[in-house]
Image: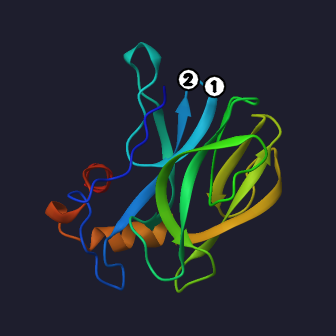
Amino acid sequence: ALRRTLPSRQQRRPLGDGFAEGLVEVSDFWNAELRQLTFHAGDPWAISGGGREERKGLQFVALASEAPGAVPVYDWWSERHRRLTLHPPPAWEGETRRGLQFYAFAQPAGGTVAVHAYWNSSLLQWTTHAGPAWRDEERPVPLFHALPAPLARAALARIPPEHRQPAAARRLC
């Protein structure tokens, strides 16, 4: 079974700039067991045979806890299509909600960018990221607003290493 990860309250630290409980990095990962990209906060999930997903890249940075104007974002599973998606409620057709990943703004907020789900016709799955469509992607669905990767890296870099999330600290040092 796939493992859900969201930083514990002990790992979240105040960042200032209006983000009372902190930020979480959201990356894409290659999941060899599901043979698809997964998009989620935290570390790579465990897969069968004792392996782990392979982290591909930081996509955006979101809120670690509730904030005014923010909505919860969950990972969802479609048994019929054997696919994971990442989006705010409600469930898309045939999906079951799995776990809370993070919070994101429903509307544009200072410094944020739109995050969309795109249908990828070569992977036969939905991808979730900011910016323009990647190769073989179409039908963008607006989902929420989050900090873009470059701005988020700059904000995280201002935080002393002992106050960063462990995963963020490893990638920034």
Query: Which color scheme did the rendering employ for the protein?
Result: rainbow
Residue drawn at point x = 68 percent, y = 47 percent: 127
As drawn, is 129 to the left or to the right of 6? right
Q: Are marks 2 and 1 in contact (CB under 8 Å)?
A: yes
Measured as percent of width and height from the top left, residue 54 is found at 47, 32
Q: Quadrant of the C terminus?
A: bottom left
**Nearest the camera: 124 or 104?**
104
Q: Is residue 62 above or below residue 117?
A: below
Count of marks placed on residues: 2
Mark linked to residue 94: none
**Nearest the camera: 108 or 84?**
84
Q: Is residue 148 visible?
A: no
Residue drawn at point x = 69 percent, y = 58 percent: 90
Q: Is residue 130 above or below residue 50?
A: below
Residue drawn at point x = 53 percent, y = 86 percent: 110
Measured as percent of width and height from the top left, residue 69 is found at 54, 81
Q: Secondary structure beneath disc 2? A: loop
Q: Secondary structure beneath disc 1? A: loop
Measured as percent of width and height from the top left, residue 21 is found at 31, 72
How crowded pointer 1 is (Cα within 10 Å; few <14, some 14-19, many 20+) is rated as: few
Mark linked to residue 32: 2
Measured as percent of width and height from the top left, residue 92 is found at 75, 50
As drawn, is 41 to the left or to the right of 132? left
Mark linked to residue 35: 1
